[in-house]
Amino acid sequence: MHATITAETWLAEADPDGGHAARWLRAARLVVLPLGRRWCAVMAPAHDGLAAAAGVQGPTIHDPVGRSVFFLVPVATPWADDLGTRLLGEGHWLTVPSPSVLEPPGSYWISPPDGSGLLVDPVRLHAALAARHSGGRS
């Protein structure tokens, strides 16, 4: 449970009003957070993102309704919006579940944050997605 509290604090720091984010995470188990402040997100189609998630470490959200997977990556990550992906940064917002939400319904963490600040390595993520597009499909 301590890791979840630490992860909630880490997530709340992405909001200019961390108290607001913390209240939403506790009460509603989700919060809409701005991207580009503490981290950005690479959005991938679910069929590719779910496969790629197995090959990377770091905070990863699955949105089954939107059929997307979001990988939290460092701010200022260089990214080519190829392979059906898109880098979301400043000016974008992401609905983020509480770190304790690990299954549907709704958005959930495939790999929740641990509060350490670890983010998905964009080079490894791109390689995992590229492998999927170059014949690694099952």
Image: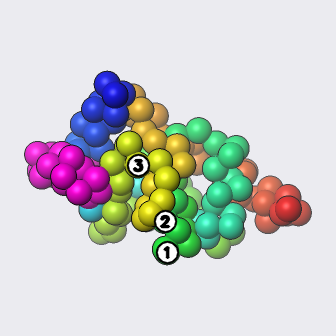
Q: Please state which of the two labelled residues, at mark 3 or mark 2, is closer to the viewer.
A: 3
| SS of the residue under disc 2 | strand
Whether pointer 1 and pointer 2 mark residues with C-beta atoms closer than 8 Å, the reply is yes
Q: Specify whether residue 97 is in view.
A: yes
| SS of the residue under disc 3 | loop
> Which residue corresponds to the image point at 70% horizontal and 44% vertical from the top-left?
55
How much space separates mark 1 and mark 2, taking CA atoms?
5 Å
- Answer with left or right where residue 75 lies relative to residue 124: left
Compared to residue 109, the image places residue 113 above or below, namely above
**Three-letter amino acid code of the residue under disc 1:** Gly
Compared to residue 103, the image places residue 107 above or below, namely below
> Which residue corresponds to the image point at 33% horizontal and 48% vertical from the top-left?
98
Binning the other alpha carbons within 10 Å of mark 3 as few (below 14), some (14 to 19) or many (20 upward) gives some
How much space separates mark 1 and mark 3, taking CA atoms?
17 Å
Please give the residue where the numbered disc 2 appears in the rendered image: 63
Compared to residue 67, the image places residue 60 above or below, namely above
Please give the residue where the numbered disc 1 appears in the rendered image: 66
Magenta span: 14-31
User: Could you say where residue 57 lies in the image, as x and y percent from the top left?
Assistant: 59, 38
**In this orientation, which residue lies closer to the viewer: 22 or 119?**
22
Please give the residue where the numbered disc 3 appears in the rendered image: 101
